[in-house]
Amino acid sequence: MSEKPKKIQPDDRLAPRAVVGRLSLYLRQLEALQAAGLTRVSSTQIANMLHLRDAQVRKDLAFFGQFGHPGIGYQIDELQSSIRKALGTDRLWPLALVGLGNLGRALIRYKEFDKHGFRIAAVFDNDPKKTGTIVQDYPVYSIDQLPEIAKSHGISIAALTVPAEVAQEVVNKLTESGIRGILNFAPVALSVPADVSVVSVDLSVQLEQLVYKVSHAGGGVSYSS
């Protein structure tokens, strides 16, 4: 008799960053498989597509609880739903975009935010020539309006796309306004309170790591950090 499937249940422990990163990779792969018309997948198939060990895939998912059909695999839609719940993206998160330079404008045009559980709720800049204008249907607010806008829109996360020299000053305003998660595109280390999380995206660092892997691996393999 087949064991009944068990859904992922939230764990009181905080998952290691590497595990969370791989969950996102699993979710992207599941979305691609579903788009291709598949309904089931095994841990071995997921592992092969991402150049991982199948035991690693099972271990990562087991961190949040055992589920699935032994010997049959995972129902793709159920697995997607469970991973989104584990990540916290099973609901829509309002996002503040801070900094309306070239990168900020590119993020505004990014159409995948809603699909993955995020929605730009407000845009901020400190340039008087930009504040008060409308960009891609978004009103641009002064950074000084951040506390009231964040509170009224229920915003707790922000994407930071400001120059490095003003990043810390802006981050101080973000944390004082109740922002608890920051996606940082400024090429600088930030100092934040203990209850605030920062994920930095430095394209130069990523390219340096890519060049290192290409130089030493000879190509032909896809890596994930």
Image (spheres, rainbow, N blue to C red):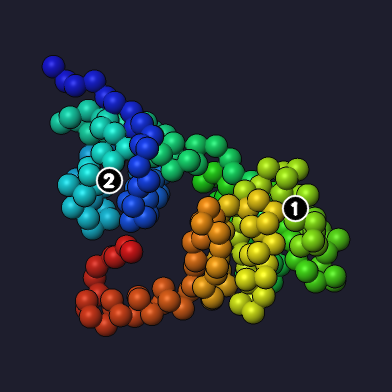
Q: Amino acid at mark 2?
A: Asp
User: Residue 108, percent across and down?
Assistant: 66, 59
Q: Secondary structure at mark 2?
A: helix
Q: Amino acid at mark 1?
A: Pro
Which quadrant, please, contains the N terminus?
top left
User: Residue 88, percent across and down?
Assistant: 48, 41
User: Residue 62, percent across and down?
Assistant: 26, 39
CB-based contact (under 8 Å), mark 2 and mark 1: no
Residue furthest out toward the bottom? 215
The structure residue drawn at horizontal position 33% and vertical position 56%, both measured from the top left corner, is: 18
Residue furthest out toward the left? 1
Residue furthest out toward the front? 194
Q: Which mark is residue 147?
A: 1
Q: Is residue 31 visible?
A: yes
The quadrant holding residue 225 is bottom left
User: Residue 173, percent across and down?
Assistant: 69, 62
The structure residue drawn at horizontal position 76% and vertical position 49%, both measured from the top left corner, is: 149
C-alpha gap between disc 2 and disc 1: 38 Å
Q: Secondary structure at mark 1?
A: helix
Mark 2 neighbour class, 10 Å CA radius: few under 14, some 14 to 19, many 20 or more = some
Q: Which mark is residue 60?
A: 2
